[in-house]
Amino acid sequence: MNKKPFIAVLFIFLISCSENFSEPMIKFDGNNIETKFNIPDLEGKIFSIDDFKGKFVLVNFWATWCAPCVRELPSLNNLHNEFKNNKNFAMIAINIGQNKSVVNKFIKEKAPIDFLVLLDENIELSDWNVQAIPTTFLINDSGKIIYKIEGEKEWDSSEFTKFFKNIIK
């Protein structure tokens, strides 16, 4: 019996099963996206990215009707609670396409959000090129997107917590 094909297949299998990913988010190289926005929070106060200058900002695009978005909210809250005293870090949840009353009712009755919620009711932030929700970006302290990830994540996992601690410092 020739063992070479078996060893080659075993080697490929082991490589595919290994954890080669050192970062839980994907490095973002398309910095042609404008991270600008001027949109309201739930009280009507207008926020822009300039309000967060000098901070790393985790921006999560979501909607109340999106089951994966809703499922990840508790872990986002936990991540926020882990870093809420870090002056170099902020978190924003940007709701896409829903009005203030729908979002307020959802947060009060179904899933509280412990960090800043902004409303993109008219989907004005199309320049961000969000293809699916949830989509989350990490913006550096200079206002550039440095990481992006799509889909539901366990934001309070040790992997993400360590990742943010290493970046934010």
Image (tube, rainbow, N blue to C red):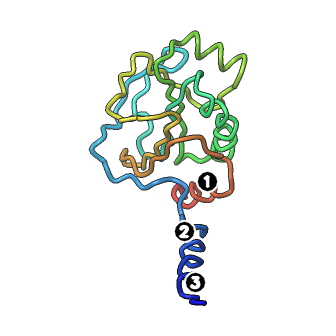
Q: CA distance from mark 1 to mark 3?
A: 35 Å
| Crowd class of label 1 (few under 14; some 14 to 19; many from 20; radius 10 Å) | some
> How far from the left and from the top, in percent, is residue 119?
48, 21
Residue 160: which numbered mark, if any? 1
| Relative horizontal placement of residue 63, taking residue 110 as reference (left or right) | left
Label 2: which secondary element:
loop
Query: Would you say the residues marked 3 and 2 are in contact, meaning their CB atoms lie under 8 Å apart?
Result: no
- The residue positioned 54% from the left and 87% from the top of the image is 4
Give the residue number, with chain letter if any, for mark 2.
20
In which quadrant of the rendered image does the C terminus lie?
bottom right
| Crowd class of label 3 (few under 14; some 14 to 19; many from 20; radius 10 Å) | few
| Amino acid at the residue labelled 3 | Ile
- The residue positioned 32% from the left and 32% from the top of the image is 127
The residue nearer to you, when weighing 73 against 42, is 73
Residue 7: which numbered mark, if any? 3
| Amino acid at the residue labelled 1 | Phe
Label 3: which secondary element:
helix
Label 1: which secondary element:
helix
The residue nearer to you, when weighing 24 against 161, is 24
Q: CA distance from mark 2 to mark 1?
A: 15 Å
Query: Would you say the residues marked 1 and 3 are in contact, meaning their CB atoms lie under 8 Å apart?
Result: no
> How far from the left and from the top, in percent, is residue 77?
67, 37
